[in-house]
Amino acid sequence: MATITAAMVKELREKTNAGMMDCKKALQEADGDLEKAVDLLRKRGVAKAEKKASRDVKDGLVEAYIHAGGKLGAMVEINCETDFVAKTDDFKEFARNVAMQIAATNPIAIKREDVPQEMIDREVEIYKDQALASGKPEHIVEKIAQGKLEKFYSEHVLLEQAYIRNPEQTIKDLLTELIAKLGENITIGSFARFRIGDE
């Protein structure tokens, strides 16, 4: 069995933001393999987040981001269970980062279930027409359209977007990590984006 050093625990903590004991345990289970330990912690974080998803979120904060020059901005409501968590630096930083993400990427919805059905139908129709026009056989047109729809979600649905500061992560990954770290259910409530000159 590999010896788990304080330096290894520190490195894993920096990578995952998990607690010290969780990092040590994950490294022991992964026999000192850092990447395996990261995967273990991510799986546990997702499991913890799923357990908390049914809990009421009655607190939180509204965060705003105004881009340099003052021509573009966004506001977002982030909800949590208690005032205590709403006041933590981690929670505030997450809210700021989400507001910045919204300003930069202009999402149309928080989760895919919120995208209007008529918009989805229109997109699918366009994708099918494009595939047929490019000479693709009809039996694979539906598959192509579904593939393009997934890409549409990843570009326009906030939780599925790649995080602008770390494209390896989605906003949902970021949220899941925060839930695991702070131990409360946290949700993105609503948002608005403003740009000078937009209708």
Image: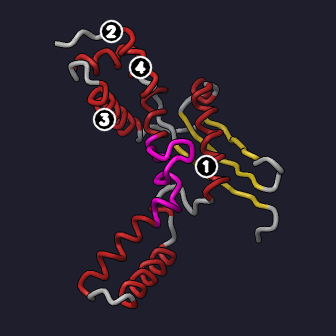
Between tags 2 and 1, which lies in front?
Answer: 2
* Magenta segment: 152-173
Disc 1 packing (10 Å; few <14; some 14–19; many ≥20): many
Q: What secondary structure is found at the residue carrying circle 1? A: helix
In terms of image quadrants, where is residue 40?
top left
Residue at the disc numbered 2: 5
Q: What secondary structure is found at the residue carrying circle 3? A: helix
Between tags 1 and 4, which lies in front?
Answer: 4
Residue 73 on the magenta span? no
The one nearer the camera, 91 or 155, is 155
Residue at the disc numbered 1: 101
How far across and how far down the image is residue 51, in percent? 35, 36
The answer to which of marks 3 and 4 sits earlier in the sequence is 4
- Spatial distance from mark 2 to mark 3, Cα to Cα? 23 Å
User: Is there CB contact under 8 Å for labels 4 and 2?
Assistant: no
Q: Amino acid at mark 3?
A: Lys
Q: What secondary structure is found at the residue carrying circle 4? A: helix
- Spatial distance from mark 3 to mark 4, Cα to Cα? 18 Å
Q: Amino acid at mark 4?
A: Glu
Q: Is residue 87 left or right of residue 47?
A: right
How far across and how far down the image is residue 96, in percent? 65, 39
User: On the rendered image, what quadrant is the N terminus found in?
Assistant: top left
Residue at the disc numbered 4: 11
The answer to which of marks 2 and 3 sits earlier in the sequence is 2
